Amino acid sequence: MIARALLFPLCLGLCMWAVPGPVAAQVKPGTLLTAPRKPTTPAAAPASQKPAPPPPVTPTPLSVKEIAARVKPSLVTVSFTGRDGAVEGTGAGFVVSPDGLIATALHVIGEARPITVQFADGRKFEVTEVHAWDRRLDLAVLRIEAKDLPALPLGDSDTLEQGTAIVAMGNPRGLDFSVVSGVVSARREIKLGEITAGNEMLQLAIPIEPGNSGGPLLDLQGQVHGVLTLKSALTENLGFAMPVNSLKSLLAKPNPVPVARWLTIGNLNPREWQPLHGARWSQKSGRVQVEGLGQGFGGRSLCLNQREVPALPYEVAVTVKLDDERGAAGLVFAADGGDLHYGFYPTAGQLRLTRFDGPTVYSWSILKNASTPHYRSGDWNTIKVRVEADRLLCYVNDHLVIESQDQQLRTGKIGLAKFRDTKATFKNFQVAKLIPTEASTAPLDKSLVQQLENLPAAPQTDVRLLSALQTNAPASRAVLVARADRLEKEVVQLRKLARTIHRKSIEAQLMKEFDQPEAKVDLFHAALLLAKLDNEELDVTAYRRQIDDMAKEIASRFAGMPDETAKLAALKKFLFEENGFHGSRSDYENRANSYVNEVLDDREGIPITLSVVFLELARRIGLDTITPAPVPGHFMVLHTPGKGERQILDVFDGASIVSPARERELRITEEDLQPASKHSIIVRMLRNLITAARRSTDHAAMLNYQELIVALTPESAGDRVGRALLRLQNEDQEGGRLDLQWLMENRPRGIDLERVEQLLRSLR
């Protein structure tokens, strides 16, 4: 066996284990693997037996150059995008079937990410299906829509002997494919935690480059004998490959998953939105994004909202930002679900109201164009339409810009639209009888406004002033630079103040939530407030409605009076089988995993956030046998049925039942299974965020989270110490001094008060 610390996969971008999962090494570093299999000596043939026929003649070996030339057309670069849309992982793959099957390593394709493959000749394909995959073997077979591809012949890896010469190929840096040669060192079994490669792996004496994961391992006849998976972190000339016979078993018994089901990252909630006419609509952190040409004329594409439209009159609004002002994107209303609807949207710096009466340009009417100084080009703009029986009123940033008496359409759905090859982002979609304007919100006290705005103005750069300053240019420049430095410091302070005000608002809402009996605390709402701390524009109401809708859909499947077993089975099927919720193994440390709204968006999270979603859905469908189990290091839930034994469920792993052996391995005690309070769950989520921020040395974010922890646990001396140190790191000496003073006044146990006193004296 090999310690996990000695190995890492070969793909660029992400450092992902060959066998994904939070698994621990079973042996100490340097422990030897099981010894290579010794060749057996055949028994001597009886004298009367005819001599065996001579072995078949081995084909003449090809040169490495010849193998590279033959294999290159079958090699592909496999890449996937991350949560931010950028390419996050890159590896290799190779054609195994002329009708579009590509073999690679599973860790190369990430988890629930859009996948593309590109050939050396530049052809690029979107993956349409994950045809077969096995996490235990770290193998995957992808399908693309292509025919007559040059498939590589698969050999028999059981015949590959120790010392056999081999060649490894891949595309570690895009199309700059590489080829290296070496020998088979041994056959090894690698055990990583509970996950064991079912077959022995091939240990290779070969200088494998990063990014070769998923590439083919070939003999000198050009036959594939393995799929490259791991390399050693200790030496450049040690790597590992999964035997190709394991890949053959996947090809023989595939478990195909359509890419629409595999791709859960950024999928629109079908209960909320219905895309029409093509283009790529996605959702992230409460924002809807669109790109690509639609199938309607002019590249038109719609995304209709599924909410019930109020009776006339009503208002619909959204805030939109275009990546290019030559494009067009905005609102649609009175839509029939096809080609009939109104549209109100910015285009070319103007606002436009249109009516679509059919699928062609001849059934399109521009009711009015309007130019206005209230539209902010290249920035966010809030557009709103008030639909009345006899007129349409169109606003931008609370200013009326278009009024129309057109009455052709009045019934139908509302939603979003884009035209041409536009990239646009939408947020704060609203529909109501009346949508309040920004001006209708309570204004800030005038004295506070004056204090915030009474900052020294920058020097005026008129001709007279410039002439005067030039009489002593060095001194003038020094004064201006000093003034600019002061203003920059003021900007920093103002931004800090704005963040503090926002944090205090979140803190007040959390304190209000927890200032009531435990049974009435809405854990999901509290978790959303936590996410809103880092995303001020998060629409809490929309996500609360989303989880309520999810619960209603699960409950709608019940017949009669379902028991707890039926409810639990329905909940697990809905989350993990139908909607693809899963533990984030390849992107575990991403802070997005701690934001419960992004867990709903991406259907990916860490144990505690997935458990929050599971617990809240269980509560909403009346499954009261589920309680939170705060197992150290790996949050779980406990199912305590009315009859039968209790079950520990690992929501990170599809709510699978934790076996007794796994319980012992994790050293789970009965105390670990006592229900965690909702208050303690939120504090634990904050501590996870601090850990994630620490990895990126984001001291400002760490302090922000620690401030909330102290507000929620004011008597925790350890958290006071932590906040004091973070305040000092963030140049808040007065805040640090106050925390240290609190420690000296309260003198809690377990704190080195002498050291606290020394630190206080240094601050004085």
Image: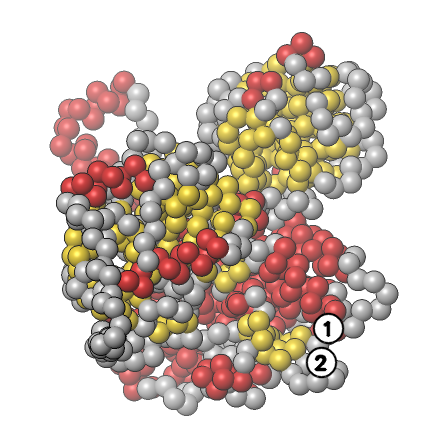
Position of the N terminus, as image quadrant, is bottom left
* Front one among 611 and 221: 221
Pick the front one: 238 or 563 = 238
Let me know if residue 149 appears in the view. Answer: yes
Tell me the residue at 67%/52% (across/down): 546
For marks 2 and 1, the one nearer the N-term is 1
Q: Work out whether residue 729 or residue 25 is closer to the camera in this orientation and state it.
A: 25
Q: Is residue 647 above or below residue 312?
A: below
- The numbered disc on residue 565 is 1
Q: Residue furthest right?
A: 560
Q: Residue furthest front?
A: 48
Give left or right: position of 351 versus 98: right
Question: Cα distance, mark 2 to mark 1?
Answer: 8 Å
Disc assigned to residue 418: none
Residue type of the residue flagged with mark 1: Thr
Provide the residue designation for mark 2. Answer: 641
- Tell whether 701 sits left or right of 414: left
- Residue at the location (45% across, 39% down)? 99
In the rendered image, the quadrant that contains the C terminus is: bottom left
* Residue type (three-letter) at the residue carrying disc 2: Pro
- Secondary structure at badge 2 equals loop
Residue 605 image offset from top left, x and y in percent: 51, 61
Of marks 2 and 1, the one in the foreground: 1
Q: Do callouts 2 and 1 mark residues in contact (Cβ within 8 Å)?
A: yes
Residue at point 53% right, 85% down?
660
Vertical relation: 67 (above or below) 401: below
Instruction: State whether residue 229 is above or below residue 173.
Output: below
Local secondary structure at mark 1: helix
